[in-house]
Amino acid sequence: MIKHKNLSIFVPHEGCPNQCSFCDQKKISGTQNPPTPQEVEKLCDEFLPHTKEEGESYEIAFFGGSFTAIDRHYMLALLQAAYPFVQQGRARGIRCSTRPDAITPEILDILKEYGVTAIELGAQSMQDDVLRMNLRGHTVADVFTASQLIKQWGFSLGLQMMPGLYGCSDYMAYAVDTAEKFIQIMPDTVRIYPTLILKDTLLEKLYQNRMYTPLTVEQAVEISAVLVKMFNEKNIRIIKLGLHADTGMENSLVAGPYHPALKELVQSRMFLDSFMADFATKPQGEYVIVVNGRQRSQATGQKKANITALAKMGYRVTIKQDNTINIDDYRILEGEKQCI
Ligand code: SF4
């Protein structure tokens, strides 16, 4: 399988008219200069490979969340700087992320003309009350309409969601509802970003005033495990789970379910959920669970959390490895000595 690589170019939305509860864009815009078209050209030239064969695994990614809502001349200039590299075969396409209410047929025509192949929408939630309370400035209907247009125009569609936003009375139920609506849309990819509280945001004020309690890491893991299972069952590719830590993010993090190995914790949790479902029909006692060697630590859980949880239910389990077992698969054998 071809390993996919992105040349990521951050485009802050200067003068964004919105004030989303979780976003510190104004601060980012003040400290991070928007790239000039010349800088984009230079970056592409330095970073992208020179052969078409290698270029096939590269995409130029304009991220920042509002690419099609920035000044039109500036957006065009960035695309014009990047597109020649797609034409030369040094990248297979361009991807961008944007707001659901910043998609129109006219914008899609422009993106098509300049080699954009994938568009990601920051949907964040599929409940209008949550979108309103987090000052998103768009509706659930906007997400459905924009998604339909993006698919109609033949782009790959990505949807991003943020479990744990302010205004969810039941974090799990709201996240599952959002995922169900994503599944109705059937995007090609999803990103799951459990909500974090950053400095100088509305969420920070609500948190300081005890009006908002973010997810704990444990809750984020539990919810994400359910979401991953839902998307996997529909073959919707999850391209990101949890925010990547960079110095800027770590410095402005106030609270919330940040964990550097969130994905690993979620995979462990998914193993535990499956083990518990399987053991529900088995008598208490000693068992061996055999997994692929690459997943032994996930199956065991951090600090043996899965082994401990099963022991509390009366199942004394040893994890063993066998590399003939498929990834994400496992076999349960009765009795500790019955290993393979
Ligand atoms: S997340 Fe909201 S506030 Fe931040 S740039 Fe996007 S639209 Fe503007």
Image (spheres, rainbow, N blue to C red):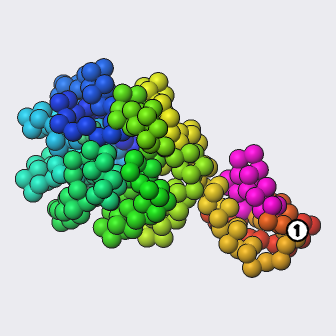
Measured as percent of width and height from the top left, residue 131 is found at: 29, 52
Q: Residue visible at 75% across and 73% down?
A: 279
Answer with the quadrant where ligand 1 appears in the image: top left
Q: Quadrant of residue 180?
A: bottom left
**Residue of label 1:** 286
Q: Which of 272/136 is in front?
A: 136
Q: In this view, does 67 lie above or below 141?
A: above
* Quadrant the C terminus occupies: bottom right
The amino acid sitting under disc 1 is Glu
Question: Does the magenta-highlighted stretch encompass residue 293?
Answer: yes
Coordinates of residue 81 in the picture (x, y in percent): 17, 34
Q: Judge from the rendering whether residue 255 lies leftward or rightward of residue 288; answer left or right.
A: left
Spot occupied by residue 146 in the image (x, y as percentages of width and height): 20, 59
The kind of secondary structure element at disc 1 is strand
Furthest toward the bottom, the residue is 281
Give the magenta-colored segment's residue range: 291-312
Residue in the image at 47% along x and 38% along y: 210
Find residue 328 and report its image quarter: bottom right
**Residue at 88% from the left image edge and 70% from the top image edge:** 285
